[in-house]
Image (cartoon, coloured by chain):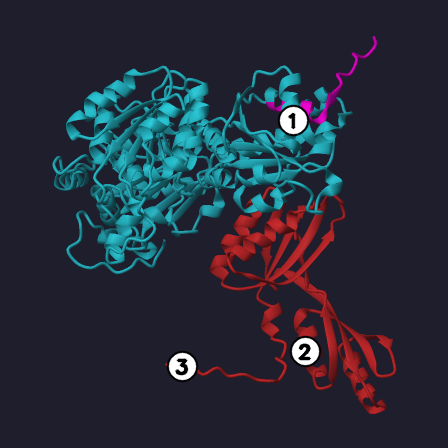
Amino acid sequence: MAKQKKIELDGAQALIKTLDSLGVEYVFGYSGGAALPIFDALETVETNMKFVLTRHEQGACHMADGYARATGKPAVVLVTSGPGAGNTITGIMTAQMDSVPMIIVTGQQVTWMLGKDAFQEADIFGITIPVVKHNYLVRETNDLPRIAKEAYHIATTGRPGPVLIDVPKNISQSPFTADFDDELAAELDLPGYKPEKAMDVDEVSIEEAARLINLAKKPLILAGHGAMISGAESELMEIANRMECPVTMTLLGKGVFPESHPLSLGMLGMHGTAYANKAICECDLIFNIGSRFDDRIIGQADKFGAQAKIIHVDIDIAEMGKMIVPDVQVVGDAKAVLQKLLPLVEKADHADWLEHLNGYKKKFPLGYKKQGGLRMQQVLDEIHDLTDGNAIISTDVGQHQMWAAQFYTNDASFKWLSSGGAGTMGFGFPAAIGAQFACPDETVISVSGDGGFQMTLCELATAVIHKLPIKILVLNNHYLGMVRQWQELFFENRESGVDLEGNPDFVKLAEAYGAKGINIKRPADVRKKLQEALDYNDGPVVINAECIKTDNVFPMIPAGAALEDMLIEPPKYKMEKPIGST
Amino acid sequence: MSRAITTTDKKPMPRPDVIGGHTLSMFVNNQPGVLMRICQIFARRAYNIDSLVVSQGRDPRFSRLTLGISGDPAGLSQIILQCDKLIDVIHCYEHTPDDSVTREMALVKVGVDGGEKRTEVLQIVEHFGGKTVDMSEGSMIVRVEGASEKVDAAIRLLTNYDIIETVRTGKVVMARGEQAT
């Protein structure tokens, strides 16, 4: 029988077909010369993928990031060469720091012009090496399906991360001459990458961890993003109940254990709850499941958990001993580790320890003053109430982020999207767009300050075109509030580079884009106005909340200070400048 | 208070511990950019690479790297893990003199104006099992090879003569016995 006629494809079409076959649902991007063949392939190849034109390449990355954080699946970012590729750096770094899967495809100058400063040529392969999990510069058209498959595999397995594929224009528009189906079916050959090892956990380390767990009198579970990525929620619940052990979560781990559960201590760290940080100081075992001991949670490393044995479960062996040297290190996928560990963990009674911590919960609750003007905490508290804590929250970085973390408690994974490691302003709103595409039936709330929102607000156009009913909460204090707080506490209140005078009228701005705008000025109006925003579902709504200008976030551990030196309320004395970390 | 800064116009002696320190071997994909990924990890942690040898493996898809690194061993073990994490790195090991052999070669160009000096240099080179590889009217090039300490010692003795320049290959390492390099 005659062999079926080979389908004629060019490289770009082979790339798009491969990404489609891998199950990619969304492509966020911005076109340009070097990416022309790939954009054309989006039109000429029949796929299930949906393309979203953004207004800036950084926005495209954050959208793919938000999509991935809300679903656990990667989206594709497609941009052109030079400045287009350059504009993705912040977005890629944000994803890398927080272990978010992403595939970035960049157009590139033709191969024979590389290194000759050709128009819109940038060595994006070299530029992005420090901020990607892996990257490629494609040199053969027939390599495209293999590279796309490898990129997807690398981005989504092990500790996830962004993978960039740089595709010169002559590579994408040359004919694809290999057999596409064969290339698609070919086994991956990555001798330096063995993520499957994470499922095969070392028995000795499991036994040693179980021994420490069963000996502990005052244990504490520290759950991080890794527990969420591995889908270890039910195992975590089971082991916490069996150990009768309080659970604290990192910023990115919020929701992996229900924050409303009696065993939950909420978030720990620089602006975490007083009781979580006190638990770290007083516990005799820190059982870290999938957190990388970020400097924002450990403070002064040699005083962190000084009285505790430490078990560190992480899929990435390079995290072992990086910040804190554990007593037992267990390298592996959090879910696989907990499954192996559960049969060895004895039922324990830690009522005294829990009672003790409940005392701290009563003594140092999170709260805010109801007088003196509109506070960000009140807006967040009320929107939590109105949405029953079930909305997807996407934040920037700064005061609003920490208050959102404190007052918008989460009971489920994948509902808290926040730039943790990178601390990227301008992340929240585009990430909310990605999350709303991923979860069209959920309430998605973007929480930003007036500073961060202005960094990526051009994506209002993207949200309006697609009629995304995102609630864009702008907690407006006309300041870069967190920096101002530090200047107040550590720099004798000398304000430098923090006053955002010249802010636009955000309601008029929203209306100019065709979005709805709502102002909140009085504390008494908050509930009514938020309800109005939540009831509006014909498109995005910008809620500009004019908040007190000079409020500060507490509790606070000055950077690099020990957790025991936490400030629960504003200090009455002059503070030393922090030197341990930024 | 001002700090006294001492200067010297003498050429610094080669420090035997510079090439010493730690010896890493890596087995990596033989592709453009791999070395960049590795070097960035060291540079970011402010570790200096004292010597570096890269060559194609027996299977041309892979390359062998030997790196000589001096620096804090605590930080280095983390760097090894980070290198190992790179997709293009198949494996990365640290080797000690107990479990491995290291060799390097140096070419030394020595200025010799008279027959007496030339004879002395030749004697030193012969003692170290080296060879003369080039001889011209005013200078000669000698080759010394062996463990880094031996090469250090030969160069130290030749420093008593007029060394014009030296080139060292950097060390290559191979694990002893059953262990893989």
For residue B163, the mark is none
Measure the alpha-carbon separation of dots 1 and 3: 63 Å
Measure the alpha-carbon separation of dots 2 and 1: 60 Å
The picture places residue A293, in percent across and down from the top left corner, at: 37, 46
Tell me the residue that label 3 is attached to.
B2
Left or right: residue A400 versus residue B125 is left
Residue under the image location 62 percent in, 68 percent down: B19
Measure the alpha-carbon separation of dots 3 and 2: 38 Å
Q: Secondary structure at mark 2?
A: helix
Residue under the image location 54 percent in, 61 percent down: B47
For residue B153, the mark is 2
Left or right: residue A76 versus residue A224 is right
Q: Quadrant of the N terminus of chain A?
A: top right
**Toward the viewer: B12 or A573?**
A573
What is the three-letter code of the residue carrying label 2?
Ala
Q: Nearer the viewer, mark 2 or mark 1?
A: 1
The picture places residue A102, in percent across and down from the top left corner, at: 52, 32
- Indicate the chain coloured red by its letter: B
Question: Could you tell me which chain the residue with mark 2 belongs to?
Answer: B
Q: Residues within 10 Å of mark 3 (few under 14, many from 20)?
A: few
Tell me the residue that label 1 is attached to.
A38
Quadrant of the image occupied by residue B90: top right
Question: Could you tell me which chain the residue with mark 3 belongs to?
Answer: B
Left or right: residue A59 versus residue B89 is left
